[in-house]
Amino acid sequence: MSNSGSTEIDAIPRPKTTRAEGVRQRLADEIAEGLLAPGMAIDETEVALRFGVSRTPVREAIRDLAAMGLVLTRPHRSALVTRPSPEHLRDMFEVMAELESSCAAHAAKRMTPSERNDLVSVHEDMASIVQDNDTQRYRAVNEQFHGAIYLGSHNEYLVELTLATRKRLSPFRRAQFQSTGRLARSYAEHDAILTAILRGEADAAVAAMRNHILVVENTYDRLVESRHDQPK
Amino acid sequence: MSNSGSTEIDAIPRPKTTRAEGVRQRLADEIAEGLLAPGMAIDETEVALRFGVSRTPVREAIRDLAAMGLVLTRPHRSALVTRPSPEHLRDMFEVMAELESSCAAHAAKRMTPSERNDLVSVHEDMASIVQDNDTQRYRAVNEQFHGAIYLGSHNEYLVELTLATRKRLSPFRRAQFQSTGRLARSYAEHDAILTAILRGEADAAVAAMRNHILVVENTYDRLVESRHDQPK
DNA sequence: GATGATTTGTACGTATGTATA
DNA sequence: ATATACATACGTACAAATCAT
């Protein structure tokens, strides 16, 4: 417990003390939910008026978002919501697959019995949700399932990178469960991951997770292709 | 025709350096070089005076550093140069090994002939530097060697994460080449990595790179232990 | 291509919260 | 415990750069 007050374990809600933090949260949400779509310019003054604060906290929030990769800033130009090229998006999914696989591998070796039980519970909860075809709830519990595996890796920094990448990809995974039958298949893939982790088989966990993530990418690709991309 | 007046070929559009950016660079350097040591508080006013700017760009720079993980900020408290716990440092090295290994694996499969030649050149340059035992130059060319492998992965996002992690660890790798004979051993390890990449053997490249990075961590550990850590 | 309008970048003053006597 | 000192958070004014006409 020698926590000499340096590295924090707070990936969990903080008291929204400062305005800049509040603005950052709201803007991040708007980006993740697609309200602020990729390519859009963010006007500092407009946001400041909209949120009832001055430009100062808005500027600080935008700077944070830029560091997270959610927006792109260039000197004296408005920040733009990041719109990765198809190649960059492919790169990000490739890395996401490796990060999540790494989490799964470590989890297979390091998860405590209690953590394993929790993971099983979450997975079992998903069964009925799949039956009901409740996309909303599935999305939420899916986050829990993956999050439990992240934590099971027992590597804080790996969790940090994985969550950051997940957030950055969120605008491009939003539609993933729209595909018919995707819920059931996702659940089956989770089952394979869970089994490998419970057996402590790191290699199998890696293979199952990699497959799971890359399927998500393919699902996204198909959705995008069917959309007749809007011009830049 | 009219190429904006300049006869120069526009290599890289030099981003007009804003003050906040300049301050960020300087502070990041001071942290990487240990001038601002882990645990130290950063006083906005002091930095502003020292760099001859107002507090505004300093605040923005500090916020960037916080997002990079180089400093820790809490509302209404001074930013502190990050001092990771030993566990967190271990986590970061573990992830660093995986990121660099991943770069090496992809590089083994994807590097172009020209990129392979460049990597060989860099490696050959290092030979004489090892002979001279020139730690300073070795450090610089070592960066080039690793950087060439990052780029060889042909995955921009992976490069981004790897560089970010490298920067974050830099305060804790500064002393790595102080250990006697470390240069020669580092060079030998590079040789194993290079051979694997040139042969296109991804698995061997992973193994060689992982070993190389974890050796760096161990070297650091020994140095720290021998230092009778100074109090907080 | 020049000029005015708009938006970002910086300085500085004040408010607010934290630490300390 | 209250008050005081001090550093950060925020708002506002102005300068500088970009863009639009």
Image (spheres, coloured by chain):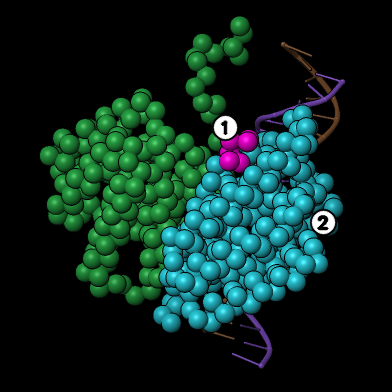
Chain colours: A cyan, B green, C brown, D purple
B100 magenta-colored = no
Q: Given the image, what chain letter belongs to the residue carrying mark 1?
A: B
Residue B30 position, x and y percent, is 41, 52
Q: Is residue A164 above or below residue B227?
A: above
Residue at image position (18%, 56%) is: B179
Q: Residue at x 53, y 53 (%)?
A: A210
> Would you name the residue on which mark 1 appears?
B16
Corner quadrant of residue A83: top right
Residue position for label 2: A51
Q: Amino acid at mark 2?
A: Phe
The kind of residue on which mark 1 rests is: Lys
Residue A86 counted in the magenta span: yes
Classify the position of the N terminus of chain B by image quarter.
top right
Disc 2: which chain? A
* Number of callouts: 2
Q: Nearer the viewer, residue A194 or A32?
A: A194
Front one among B100 and B37? B100
Spatial separation of the CA atoms under disc 2 and disc 1: 30 Å
Q: Residue furthest left?
A: B131
Q: Residue at x 53, y 58 (%)?
A: A208
Q: Secondary structure at mark 2?
A: helix
Q: Percent position (x, y) of residue B53?
A: 56, 46
In this image, A83 relative to A163: left or right?
right
- Labels 2 and 1 share a subunit: no
Element type at mark 1: loop
Instruction: Mark yes or no: residue B182 visible.
Output: yes
Q: Which mark is residue B108?
A: none
